[in-house]
Image (spheres, rainbow, N blue to C red):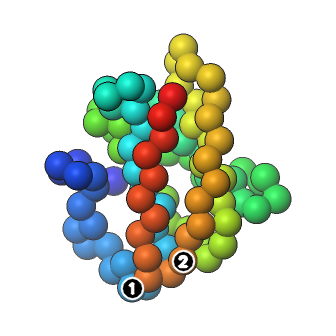
Amino acid sequence: MCGAKVGGLGLGDVVAAKEAVIQGQVVKGEEPVGNAYVRLLDSTGEFTAEVPTSATGHFRFFAGNGQWTLRTLAPGAETVDRTVAAQVGEVAEVTISL
């Protein structure tokens, strides 16, 4: 994962034109949620990947084109599912509120 910056994650060495990037931040109120887990599920609901959020609540996935579900799990919070569309050459920015 790249270091966090104001406004979200920087793309650093990522060649966005060749990747379908899904990234964002998990928040509760105005506060970032570190140590949560975000799962990437395909269009059939199958588990594809999981990453922990950074201390600033950020996460990133590289995915294929199509509809994906982000499932967020955090201590003391209900599970939150969020649908997102990924497209090669684009960065899908998502904020997940718990």
- Residue at 60% of width from left, 74% of height from top? 64
Specify the amino acid type for callout 1: Ala
Q: Which mark is residue 27?
A: none
Query: How many angstroms separate mark 1 from mark 2 (CA)?
Result: 10 Å
Q: Quadrant of residue 55?
A: top left
Extreme residue in the top direction: 76
Whether residue 71 appears in this view of the structure is: yes
Q: Secondary structure at mark 2?
A: loop
Is 91 on the left-hand or right-hand side of 31? right
Rendering coords of residue 50 (x, y %): 57, 46
- For label 2, the crowd category at 10 Å Cα-Cα, with few meaning under 14, some 14 to 19 and many 20 or more, is some
Q: Position of residue 92 (x, y in %)?
A: 46, 64
In-image side of 43 versus 25 (left or right): right
Please name the residue that numbered disc 1 is placed on.
17
Query: Considering only vertical position in the picture, is 61 above or below 95?
Result: below
Relative to residue 54, is residue 13 drawn left or right?
left
Q: Is residue 26 above or below residue 44?
A: above
Locate residue 25: give its quadrant. top left
Name the amino acid type tagged 2: Gln
State the residue at coordinates (49%, 74%). Answer: 20
Circle 1 — which element? helix
Q: Is residue 59 above or below residue 19?
A: above
Tell me the tag on residue 87.
2
